[in-house]
Image: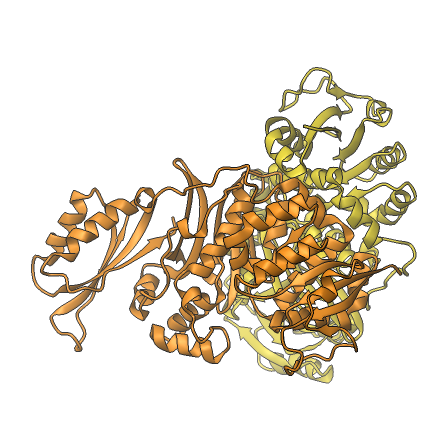
Chain colours: A orange, B yellow
Amino acid sequence: MEKTKVAIVGLGTVGTGVARLLLDYGDRTARHAGRTLWLEKVVVRDLHKPRAIRLPQGVLTDQLEDVTANPEIKAVAQLIGGLEPARSIMLRLLESGKDVITANKALLAEHGGELFDRARELGRTIAFEASVAGGIPIVTNISQCLSANQITSIHAILNGTSNYILTRMEEDQCDFAEAVAEAQRQGYAEADPTMDIDGTDAAQKLAILAHLAFGARVNWRDIPRRGIQTVEADDLQYARQLGYRIKLLAVAELIDSGLQLYVSPTLVKIGTPLAEVRGAYNAVSVVGDAVGRVFFHGLGAGQMPTASAVVADLIDVVVGRAPITFRTLELWSQRYDRLKPPSPEQMPGRFYLRFNVEDRPGVMAELTSVLGRHQISIASIIQHPGSNDDPGVVPLVIMTHQTSEGAVLSALEQIKHLSCVQGGNVVLRVRS
Amino acid sequence: MEKTKVAIVGLGTVGTGVARLLLDYGDRTARHAGRTLWLEKVVVRDLHKPRAIRLPQGVLTDQLEDVTANPEIKAVAQLIGGLEPARSIMLRLLESGKDVITANKALLAEHGGELFDRARELGRTIAFEASVAGGIPIVTNISQCLSANQITSIHAILNGTSNYILTRMEEDQCDFAEAVAEAQRQGYAEADPTMDIDGTDAAQKLAILAHLAFGARVNWRDIPRRGIQTVEADDLQYARQLGYRIKLLAVAELIDSGLQLYVSPTLVKIGTPLAEVRGAYNAVSVVGDAVGRVFFHGLGAGQMPTASAVVADLIDVVVGRAPITFRTLELWSQRYDRLKPPSPEQMPGRFYLRFNVEDRPGVMAELTSVLGRHQISIASIIQHPGSNDDPGVVPLVIMTHQTSEGAVLSALEQIKHLSCVQGGNVVLRVRS
């Protein structure tokens, strides 16, 4: 059987998983590739670090040149996180004639334009299934399987850490800090989980999906985003009373004023598939004008789900499918203008608002008259008696009808200054 | 922009949808194919039949030769149902040098071996995404996206008609006949819905998926199957009391004794994704040893979802991805032995049993002692007071622990002959 030599750069969690699939399960990759994928080299920084896998003699090296200078190595899984040296290494690999597979969404979200243009100039391919939603093959599904459609919307849970934290808060009725600690204990959250929690990770992945689905060359920094750090256990209970769960949604949707993009904790109706996504799972709900709604659910991270996506890409690169896709789609081409999403102020939507207010007559009238002046119409109100911790102050939850984020923010600005309001301004979106 | 000529054979519902996508939305196919897909010919039997679409002058023809004799036409969407003349036409198309796209699962389940071997001999490609689960791109996902995995199980709802009928029976608490009539009124069931209802359609699709996922060359007739015609509204209510819904599941699963395959109405735990699939939707839950569980949900039939899959295949064929997949996978190759699934008797599982029994002392002991003699252990029992329609006879529902279908069938044979049993033997599977 024909043999194609491949390499891995970076032997962290995912790199180890990829090495395992190539070394221990060569028969299955052979069946799907019609040839053996031969793991020739694994490049690491530190040769002496203990490794969770035994590699055959001569495979491990700390010299990238062992890969770049070897013309028999055709495809490289480049599995280093962060921006540098990941970017420079990817450029060196492309320039030495390798096709490159990556799982690094931050690198693509930041330098996709440069890297893809360079790959095209050199006639090379970059494959990146593993960069979004881990084990869910959403990149191939959008760029290949749904190619007959105008995609009209994507609603996705792309950050497993946030989803795990929200699930814990809801199911165990614990607060945000406790849920974060539990996520760290279970290995679902990093020691510093900021990028997962504040919506950065989801926005970077959304930028990639928006690019694939809408041809929108968008900078992830331009995507309005809120993280889950403002969500309290009480919000999950109020949401449930209203018939919703709270999920960190990444949304790309064609609306009248263009392509709306945002990441926000969002109330999702109980019983719909996205609301039922639990724990560290990811999910993507895509609507195409021909196919209707297609829903995908799977593990968004983890060693073997991510390795599964990387090895599928390796096979696609080696057999020649990925190069075709890469050539025809012209991803991140600088030929297209960069898209500026509509400013948050113009974004339509329904909203969930929570305030802590003084428990006295007239408060409801003050608040609702501010909303009324901003043409914000109220769908539901929840007010319960105050707790003993803080007598005299009660939470007030308002769910609005369709309005604009601009109207909501400007109303909130006024509400904040009302003497009856004692902080606790929470603004979440509601999926219509 | 480069132009590739394509043709359609058969202008029924799906053919019309495909023509519409090619004619009205050429820009999007061009973006994904890097060239224009030019609809050169549409072959129909009757030129004078009124059509739901206006084709450009000269496109419609009743001569297949206008396609076979035109070397510029590279790919043909062959959208005729049934076995003949669909089979002969596909052979003629392949022999005249065309790659062929089909949505005809019955044709593949019956003649896949012959057609795929002939295509390989001729260096041609057959693409068939639309043949299973309509708008869910499950063929590409299994044969390409999950290629790093050993698939260990597939649990799928592949027949939208049956799922629609079961949903109506559950939600409207109507009986089977009423639900079928409603499905016919809504266009979800044919005038003769036998093949949908008795499990034939699902077994044919399962044979294709089993082939893709396990390399199992299986004749769909060898797949044990039960349809939904024995399910009564009461069963749905009892199932709900036990915490389950009833779905027509198509299952392929690696177990100790080999690859277990069956189609059966099955109790699926409420709250799991498959249990929540409503109406005419399809869903596929796939487990791979690396990726874990991936769940897909979408419209399993209908004009535009199916056309979406056909046009994605057309693009894949024309750009060259589908030919690569077709060559490497060796589908339905006669090189492999035909797989005989384990006989139903050996198949392990949990079961739901319902009998109508006389309402008198001692009945429960008689029944359960038969089960005991067959080593069948009972997990739950439901017995309610009898109805006024049939005093003296009450339904008795038993859910078993893990056992074998052989044990259950042989116990039932004895139970049927007990004087206290008045018919109504319903056997359903329970998903563990």
Q: Quadrant of residue A70?
A: bottom right
Question: From the viewer's perspective, is residue A111 above or below residue A56?
Answer: above
Residue projecting furthest to the left: A361
Q: What's the residue at 65%, 70% (across, down)?
A: A15
Numbered disc total: 0
Question: From the viewer's perspective, is residue B264 above or below residue B124?
Answer: below
Q: Is residue A395 left or right of residue B111?
A: left
Whether residue B29 can be seen here: yes
Q: Nearer the viewer, residue B146 or A269?
A: B146
Q: Nearer the viewer, residue B250 or B144?
A: B144
Whether residue B423 can be seen here: no
x, y percent for residue B417: 73, 72
- Quadrant containing the N terminus of chain B is top right
- Quadrant containing the C terminus of chain B is bottom right
Q: Is residue A422 left or right of residue B374?
A: left
Q: Nearer the viewer, residue B286 or B96?
A: B96
Q: What's the residue at 88%, 31% (across, down)?
A: B96
x, y percent for residue B164: 57, 49
Q: What's the residue at 73%, 80% (across, down)?
A: A54
Residue projecting furthest to the top: B57
Q: Is residue B40 left or right of residue B135?
A: right
x, y percent for residue A317: 72, 53
Question: From the viewer's perspective, is residue B69 above or below residue A177?
Answer: above
x, y percent for residue B235: 57, 63
